[in-house]
Image (spheres, helix red, strand yellow):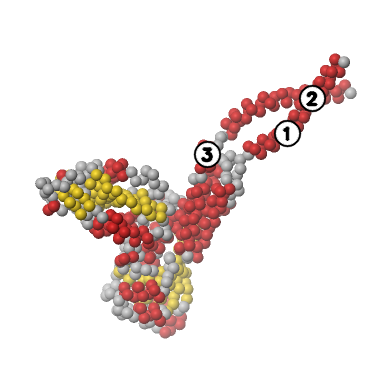
Amino acid sequence: MAAEAAAEERSRGKYSASCITVVVILLGLPLWWKTTETYRASLPYSQINELDILLLDISVPVEVVFARGTLTTEQQKKLLPQTQFSQKMNQLDDKTGFKYRYEKTYRAATGMEQDAIMGGNVEVAVVTLSRVYESLAGSVVIYVVPADSQLLPQEVSVYIGKHRAAFLRSPVTGSHSVEDVLQDIDDNVEEILQTMSFTDDMVIAALSNRVPSGMFGTDTFRDSMTAFKSSLGYEITFSLLNPDPKSHNVCWEIERAVNNYVQPFLDKLSFIANFSVDSQILYYAVLGVTPRFDKTSSSFSLNEDSLPHVINPVEAKLGSSVASSYPVLNFLLYVPEYSHSPLYIRDSNGSPVESNAFHSSRWGGIMIYNVDQRQLNETQLPVAVNIDMARVMEVFLSQLRRLLLGIQRVQPLSESLVQSPGNMVVTDWETDRLLWVRTVENIATATNTLTSLAQLLDEIGNIVINDNIASEVYSAVASVQRSLQELEAGRLLPAFLASKEAITSSEKAFFDPSLLHLLYFPDDQKFAIYIPLFLPMCVPIVLSLLKTGKDLKWRKKVD
C-alpha cells in the first residue's frame, strides 16, 4: 500500500508539473507578452526617408506686359502672347538642393492698364494698377513702357513700386528682331526679379539647417545670423533705462508710439507669426561699460569694440525671456546719467554713428538718447525729459524690419528707383521675399525634425508611439508634401501656410512628453528586473519536467 501511495503521489506531482508548464506556456507567456508589449503606432517611415533628400522646386509667376509703342506690329504678332521658362539648379550637397524657374508670360497691356501707364505720375500708376490687377503673393508684373515715356523720371530706366509691379523703360527699338527683343528684355527682367523676388543666397541661407556653413557667402552668412529664425510667434519688449532718475524725469508715450508706428507693421505680418508687445521702465540700470571722455568734443563715447559687453549686464535686469516660449526681441532706450552726458556711439573709424544705436544678432537693439544740454541745470534737478518717440521708433522699426525679421534693404539697380512703402510700412514684394525665406526655412526645419524623430524611434525600440504622435507625424509629412507641391505650382501663400502646419505638427510630435527616453528602461535593466521574478518560479518547474522526462525514459527501457 505504501508503494502504491508513493507511486500515486509521484504521478500526481508529474501531472501537476505538466499542467503548470502547459498553463505557463499557453496562457502565462502570451498574457505576459501582451500586457508588457510596447504600443507603437505605425509611422510613414518610407515617406520620411524620401523627405530626407530635399530638392526644392520653386516656380515664380512673372508677367511681362508691353505697353503701346514698345513693339512694332510685326513684333507683336511674333511675340505676343507666349510663355517662356528660365530655370536654374543649385545642388548644395548629396541630400539638399533647389531649382527655380521663372514662368514668364509675355502679353500686351489691356485698355485699363494702358490708361494708367499713359499718365504722367508713376506713383498714381502704381496705385491704379494695383486696383486693376490683383496679383498673387510671390508673383511679379513688369510693365515695359516706351523709351520716351514721361511716366518715369529722367535717367530712370527701372522703377520698382511698393506693390508687385515694376516699370521698365524699353531698351529696344523697332529695328530689332524678336530674338533681340527677348534677350534685351530678359536681361533687365532677371535683374528686377533678383530684387523683387528671392536670390540664390537667400535660399541657401534658409537651408542653413541642412547644409554646411561653408556654403554661405560672407554677406549672406552675416544676414542669416542676424535675422531671427522662423518661429510661430515673437515677443517684442520695449524698455526705457533711466540710470539716473534723480537727474532725469523721463516721460515716453510708448503706447501711442507702438500703435502709430509698430502695430501697422505687425498687422502686415500677422499671418506670418503671432506678435505680442509689452514695455517696461527700469531705474538705476546702467550699461555696465564705462564710457570714455573725449576732450575734443566734450562728450563721452562708446567704441564699437565695447558694445558686445553692454548686453549681458543689461539683459540680466530685463527678465523678459525667462518665461517666454517664443523668441524675444528687446529694444532698449537708454538715457545716460547726468555725469556721462552726452554719450555717443562711435564706429571703427571713430566717427559718431548717426542713429546713436546698435543691434545685437538675434537679440535686439539699443539706442542712446541724449538729453538736450541746454536743459541740464544742476540747481533744477530732476530735468523733465520728453522723448521724441518718432525719432526713436524710426530707429527701432528699422532694426525690426531690416535686421531682426530678415527684411533687408535691397541694393537698387543702376538707373533704378525703389518706391518707399509709405504708410504700408513694408511693401508687398518685401513681404513676398520674407515669405519665400520663411517657407523654405520651415520646410527644412520640418524635414530635419521628422528625420531626427524617425531615427530616434528606430534606435529606441521600446518607446511608446501613441496615436496622437502618429497623427501629428502623418499631418507633418502631408503638410510638407503639400507645401512642396504649392511651391512647384508657384502659389507662395498656400505653400507658406502648409509649411507652418508642417513645422507645428512636427515639433508637437518631436517634443511630446511621452517620447522622453528617460521614461524607458534599456534591455539589460529589463533582464535585471525579470530574472528575479521568473527564476524562482521556473526552477522547480524545469526540475520537475527533467525528472518526468527521466522517468519516461526509464519506463521505456523497462518495457
* Residue appearing at x 36%, y 58% in the figure: 266
Compared to residue 313, the image places residue 357 above or below, namely: below
Q: Which residue occupies the extreme bottom position in the image?
A: 73
Question: Who comes first in sequence, dot 3 or dot 1?
Answer: 1
Amino acid type indicated by mark 1: Ile
Q: Give the CA distance from mark 3 to mark 2.
A: 46 Å
* Residue appearing at x 81%, y 21% in the figure: 10
From the viewer's perspective, is 151 left or right of 243?
right
Question: Who comes first in sequence, dot 1 or dot 2?
Answer: 2
Q: Give the CA distance from mark 1 to mark 2.
A: 16 Å
Residue, disc 1: 25
Residue, disc 3: 517
Compared to residue 479, the image places residue 181 above or below, namely: below
The front one of 288 and 385 is 385
Amino acid type indicated by mark 3: His
Q: Which residue occupies the extreme left position in the image?
A: 379
* Quadrant of the rendering where the N terminus is positioned: top right
From the viewer's perspective, is 120 left or right of 93?
left
* Label 1 element class: helix
Residue, disc 2: 14
- Measured as percent of width and height from the top left, residue 225 is found at 36, 51
- Measured as percent of width and height from the top left, residue 471 is found at 56, 51
| Mark 1 neighbour class, 10 Å CA radius: few under 14, some 14 to 19, many 20 or more | few
Q: Quadrant of residue 544?
A: top right
